[in-house]
Amino acid sequence: MTEIKRIIFAGTPDFAVPSLAALIAAGYSICAVYTQPDRPAGRGRKLQASPVKQLALKHDIPVYQPVTLKDPEAQAQLQALNADLMVVAAYGLLLPQVVLDTPRLGCINVHASLLPRWRGAAPIHRALLAGDESSGITIMKMALGLDTGDMLLKAETPVSPEDTGQTLHDKLAASGADCLIQALQQWDNLSPEVQDETLTCYAKKLDKAEAQLDWSHSAEQLQRKIRAFNPWPVAQAEISGLSLRIWQAQVATDESDSKAAPGTLLRGNKQGLDIQTGAGVLRLLHIQQAGKRPMPVVDFLNAHPEFKI
């Protein structure tokens, strides 16, 4: 039976926290945590430790924050840890081959997609944008390519019509932690599966410019974008000359297409703001003006009676 005594954990954002917490709770020996350097955050732009670093420090786990792992000194430092396995979850740095080969059992990744469906930086958001009915977690053996390694264990998570980038993130983060522990406990019985290259899609990193809604798209496409971009970068659009951020919307199935141009405000009442799109009507439910807090449309209409139609 393979013994996994010393684990290096590499991760940075909230997504990785449940996986590290699960390793700690299960009693695994975490000899070091690797995470990205502290970044300026908040209005004061003060340096802030990553969520993973904050958890590691609470448990007195040594933390390493190299700017790159391509540096020979950083590689030597990692090698000196004499780890059995490196577990990676949304770390944010590329691992060169020498690092992948350093732990005795190699490196595994907690990836937020049912590979090979979405490879890349934003699999959760791209799944929502594409209208995928399911997502999931893949525990994979890491290779030099972008999420190209053999799959060790997979767990499917249904995507509900109400899921946002945040809710699906939280579901997958929790599932990732469960899958990680399961993979470690079943290590000797795992059967690596090669990915089918013909089924892969590239989940490119989100860009703020993508958040701008194009009313010529269908109501369904726009609703997916609003869900995917909640809570960041938040979809935005101009409606009757007013710039708004759109937090929540639904396809208005009780409305039929009008002859109005896409982007036209058809009606505004306590049910929402109905906007004509390229195909169908989108009903805005929760919106935000610049400098204001997000609010239900009914509250917005109280302050802007001119939008009542």
Image (cartoon, rainbow, N blue to C red):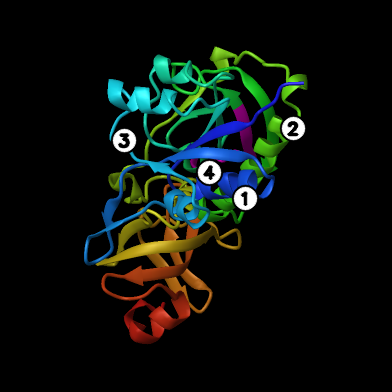
* Image location (x, y in percent) of residue 192: 67, 16
Dot 2 or dot 4: first in sequence order is: 4
Dot 4 or dot 3: first in sequence order is: 3
Within 10 Å of the Cα at label 4, are there few (<14), some (14-19), or many (20+) other Cα atoms? many
Q: Nearer the viewer, residue 63 or 99?
A: 63
Residue 135 occupies quadrant: top right
* Image location (x, y in percent) of residue 103: 52, 21
Q: Nearer the viewer, residue 122 or 261?
A: 122
Query: Would you name the residue on which mark 3 appears?
Result: 66
180 left or right of 144 in image: right
Residue 68 occupies quadrant: top left
Real-space Cα separation, disc 1 to disc 2, in angstroms: 22 Å
Real-space Cα separation, disc 2 to disc 4, in angstroms: 31 Å
Within 10 Å of the Cα at label 3, are there few (<14), some (14-19), or many (20+) other Cα atoms? some
Dot 4 or dot 1: first in sequence order is: 4
Labels 4, 3: front one: 3
Q: Amino acid at mark 4?
A: Leu
Residue at 54%, 13% in the rendered image: 197
- SS type, badge 3: loop
Query: Would you name the residue on which mark 4 appears?
Result: 128
Residue range in magenta is 127-139
Query: Would you name the residue on which mark 2 appears?
Result: 185
267 part of magenta stretch: no
Q: Amino acid at mark 1?
A: Lys
Q: Amino acid at mark 2?
A: Gln
Labels 1, 3: front one: 3
Query: Would you name the residue on which mark 1 appears?
Result: 171
137 part of magenta stretch: yes
Real-space Cα separation, disc 2 to disc 3, in angstroms: 30 Å
